[in-house]
Image: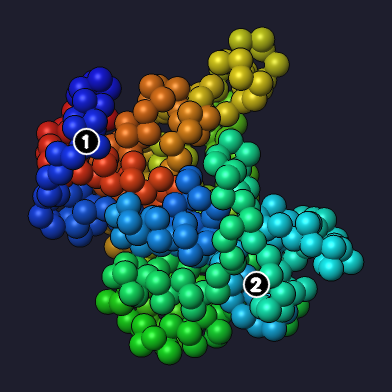
Amino acid sequence: MNTSKRLLVSVSLFIGVVMSCRATGDFPTLTGAPPLVIGHRGASGYLPEHTVEAYRLAIQQGADFIEPDLVSTKDRVLIARHEINITQTTDVAQHPEFAARQTQKTIDGVTEQGWFADDFTLAEIKTLRAVQRVPFRPQQFNGLFKVPTFREVLKLALREGVGVYPETKHPSYHQSVGLPLERRLVSILNAFNLRTRRDPVIIQSFEVANLEELNALTGVRLVQLIDAEGIALDGTLIPNRPYDFVLAGDPRTYADLLTDAGLAEIKTYADGIGPWKRYIVSVKGVDQNGDGRPDDVNGDGSVNDADRTRLPPTDLVPRAHAAHLFVHPFTFRNEGLFLASDYGASPVEEYLQFYCLGNDGLFSDFSDSALSARHLVGIAPTICSQDP
């Protein structure tokens, strides 16, 4: 099905022709169930990330899960922030009473300047307000919303009947400063009687050791996140390592975890993988001037996905399924700079390809777009038999 035909169907959905998805068993996922839409940091394409308001909007858009990244305050409260460094996502720099808290820290081997959550009590965090981190997204909501605790996010999810997908951020760093995340996270889940794989909770981490610890502490589902340093000109992924591997002197990279042996190892402590989407569909650049680096093809002043074209899909999804692991890639965004040029600036085209490849869910900043594309797969079974 060509882009124009797909977009016509998509528009019909947006204007209200709502039809139900196919029944469980009809999708090319591990179980046949419809792929999950995970509200990445809430509806972060529209509102400041990791706020109750952003999570609520993702739920209203139809997300199946909402994703709070978790860091710790000085007084051991888990709050929803993507980074321990809160400089870019709050108005802390505008608070003269906290000027002296600005400092330098090394997080996962990277030296950073700013203000850090673990230097603040929860009461102090609650005096701050969230701001939009991405400059080309709406800025009019800056300074309006508070930073929520994990308990507040969890209560919202349970009240609204959706799942929660927390990530333990920088677990080795938290351990090093005496603020380990794992037992506190499990204690909160236990308080809400969330203990088993049947419960609407999935915990994720880029590190391995803390997932192994969590596997011994709780029965909820766990996901091994898979990262990379970047992409070479030819589309080859540049590997990096889980930071706990770095600390332990383990030379293995994330790519090693995606071999058949690596997937089998992951299965011993986790239920799924969350790879960067380029492990499933990579993109290659253009080097017209022969300098060995990708060119800014569209002339927008930067080299990004819009200057690259897709490579054929890898075999990661079927191999993960063969290891009985589900696959939830990240992160899907509507803006053109995040879309390979041959998607024709259509995020729906990207979603359709990943759904038709059998991914069991995905993380999106725009849950509404992800749901619209999922509806297309649900109401038009032939889409996945067409050239994706």
**Please, is residue 199 above or below residue 240 in the view?**
below
Image coords of residue 264 (percent x, y): 39, 64
- Residue type at tag 1: Ile
Sort mark 1 into few (<14), some (14-19) or many (20+) by Cα contacts within 10 Å. few
* Residue drawn at (49%, 78%) of the image: 151
Question: How many numbered circles does the render carry?
Answer: 2
Element type where label 1 sits in the image: loop
* Residue drawn at (40%, 61%) of the image: 56
> What mark, if any, has residue 15 been given in the picture?
1
Q: In this view, does 224 lie to the left or right of 356?
A: right
Q: In this view, does 379 lie to the left or right of 287?
A: left
Give residue 168's quadrant in the image.
Answer: bottom right
Element type where label 2 sits in the image: loop
Q: Quadrant of the N terminus?
A: top left
- Residue type at tag 2: Lys
Q: Quadrant of the C terminus?
A: top left
* Residue drawn at (61%, 15%) of the image: 299
Image coords of residue 109 (percent x, y): 76, 58
Q: Distance between the residues labelled 2 and 1?
A: 39 Å
Asked whether residue 383 is in view, the answer is yes
**Please, is residue 116 above or below residue 316 in the view?**
below
Which residue is denoted by mark 2 in the rendering? Answer: 126
Q: Which of 138 and 202 is in front in this view?
A: 138
Q: First in sequence, mark 2 or 1: give its number.
A: 1
